Image (cartoon, grey):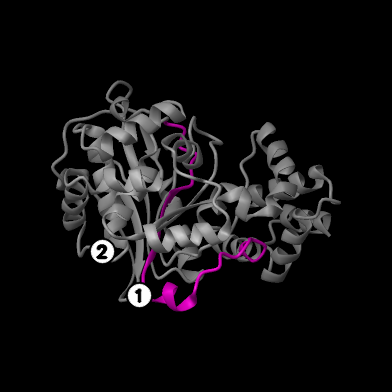
Amino acid sequence: MLEKFTRQLAGSNPLANEQVRQAVDQLADERVSAAAKADFLTALAQKGETPDEIAAFARALRDKSVPPPIDPAWRDAREILDVVGTGGDRLGTFNISTAAALICAAAGVTVAKHGNRAVTSQAGSADVLEALGVRIDLPPLDAVRSLRERRFAFFFAPAWHPAFKHIAPARKLCAERGQRTIFNYLGPLLNPVRPSAMLVGVPQPELCEPLARVLQSLGVRRAMVVCGKVQSPESKIQSAIDELSTLGENTIAEFYQERGFATSTLSPEQFPLQRATLADLIGGDRRANAEIIRHLVRGEERGPKRDAVLLNSAAALFVAGKTKSLAEGWDLAGQTIDSGHASAKLEELTR
């Protein structure tokens, strides 16, 4: 069946929703060869994934995930936020999204952080949180308890998506061929908690609107999908970063229950930023990035790294409905750090 779908995709014909579900069943089947799976994923990528296909893959894979035991009434009474990037910008910045997620939790937002170890960077969210001393392998009941009582829990992707074990060899084959796959987009869409509010970073501005449309179709109530520009003063070459950038203009696609879908640009000049270059935001391995985050939440880092985290925290707080504007979010993020609440939250999560 997978070979049939591969031929269909090679003819530039998209997959219907039921075909996607059947394809996911085949991808998760250990009896199907990794080569056949890799050929299918390659054909899909070369055709170009449509928003409908991405949404259908996300639904089918989420249905195979381990469901967290969350009380529906408790869920409906609040926004549950995830702050996440797709990765793939290969710029080597420190873990800005993870730092922003911790600050949002310290500011009173319920944060379900979904992530994995590094694939295209030196330190993924799981790596840096583990280095900080935060448990990344909580059993389902403990993870939900942490979410309720501490307003933060990490949901380690391999533990919540057992089907990925049988997909990993095919993804490795694609990587060896230099071929990206749909899984480059799917990571932020597969949070088993199914957050109601999301700040998602993507490495290409043209991905903002289609991925936001996908989130909307998946039932997310409030979301912002962003891609920032990074201007290199040495080469005059612009790069893109899967965060809100303090180093150039940002592309944004967003939607909220109370108002419709919108696309816009955001200049960092609207905020009280210090002069900075990409070099000021570069991180290192898991231990180096953990130390950067420790300095940030303690208020000891007052330079461009703090600005980058404040900007992304501002957007996340706004998306979660905690503040009424990005400017208010910027101020709240700064107050959360300077009051000691961010440092206290990290200490709480490491006990």
Tell me where residue 139 sits by quadrant.
Answer: bottom right
Q: Which residues are magenta?
A: 62-91
Horizontal and vertical percent position of residue 251:
33, 51
Horizontal and vertical percent position of residue 125:
47, 42
Left or right: 273, with 149 as reference point: left
Q: In the rendered image, is residue 247 in sight?
A: no
Can you identify the residue that label 1 sits on? Answer: 257
Kindly identify the residue that appears in the image at 74 percent across and 41 percent down: 169
Residue type, mark 2 in image = Lys
Left or right: 218, with 268 as reference point: right
The residue sitting at the front extreme is 351
**Which of the numbered marks, if any, corresponds to residue 322?**
2
- Residue 60 vertical placement versus 36 (above, below): below
Placement of the C terminus among the 4 image quadrants: top left
The residue sitting at the top extreme is 234
The residue sitting at the right extreme is 31
